[in-house]
Image: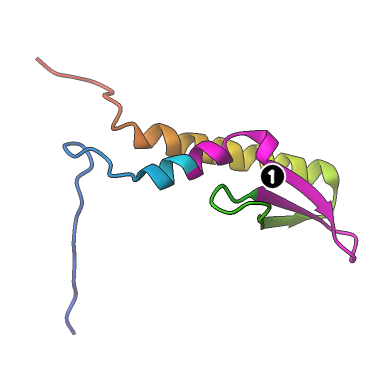
Amino acid sequence: MTLYYRTYSWANTSPRITDEELQYLTSLVEKKNWRIVQLPNGYYQTEYLNPNKENDWVDVTRRETVKGAEAAIDASIEHYKKRLDFAKGPVVVKTFE
């Protein structure tokens, strides 16, 4: 049996993010680009507006209540904010002399 093992170091390299990915993440952190729709089965679906295509909504999650769907949107926005912050580069936590 052969194993392949690879490690990555994020501390000394700047994150590589394209302008398209940056535009995508910036779009997802704005709540105005999200919506909730009710499905025929009574569930509520969260969707975001695809920034690369006009009037193209992408479904993300399904919840039983509107309150649950809005909480899912808020959690998704927080997640994408963290990804956007990470794209700026690593955060120095502590330095030594």
Q: Is residue 96 above or below residue 57?
A: above
Element type where label 1 sits in the image: helix
Q: Residue at x 20, y 37 (%)?
A: 11
Residue placed most toward the observer, 15 or 51? 51
Query: Label 1 is placed on what type of residue?
Result: Ala
Q: Residue furthest left?
A: 97
In the image, is 17 to the left or to the right of 23?
left
In the image, is 12 to the left or to the right of 63?
left
What colour scheme does the image use? rainbow
| Quadrant placement of the C terminus | top left
Residue 16 location, quadrant: top left
Residue placed most toward the observer, 68 or 38? 38
In the image, is 62 to the left or to the right of 96?
right
Where residue 80 appears, x then y in whole percent? 52, 40
Q: Residue at x 90, y 65 (%)?
A: 40
Q: Residue at x 30, y 27 (%)?
A: 91
| Quadrant placement of the N terminus | bottom left
Where residue 73 appears, x then y in whole percent? 68, 42
Residue 95 location, quadrant: top left
Q: Is residue 30 above or below residue 50?
A: above
From which residue to which does the magenta span run?
24-48
Residue 62 location, quadrant: bottom right
Q: Residue furthest bottom?
A: 1
The answer to whether residue 14 is magenta is no
Where residue 19 appears, x then y in whole percent? 37, 42
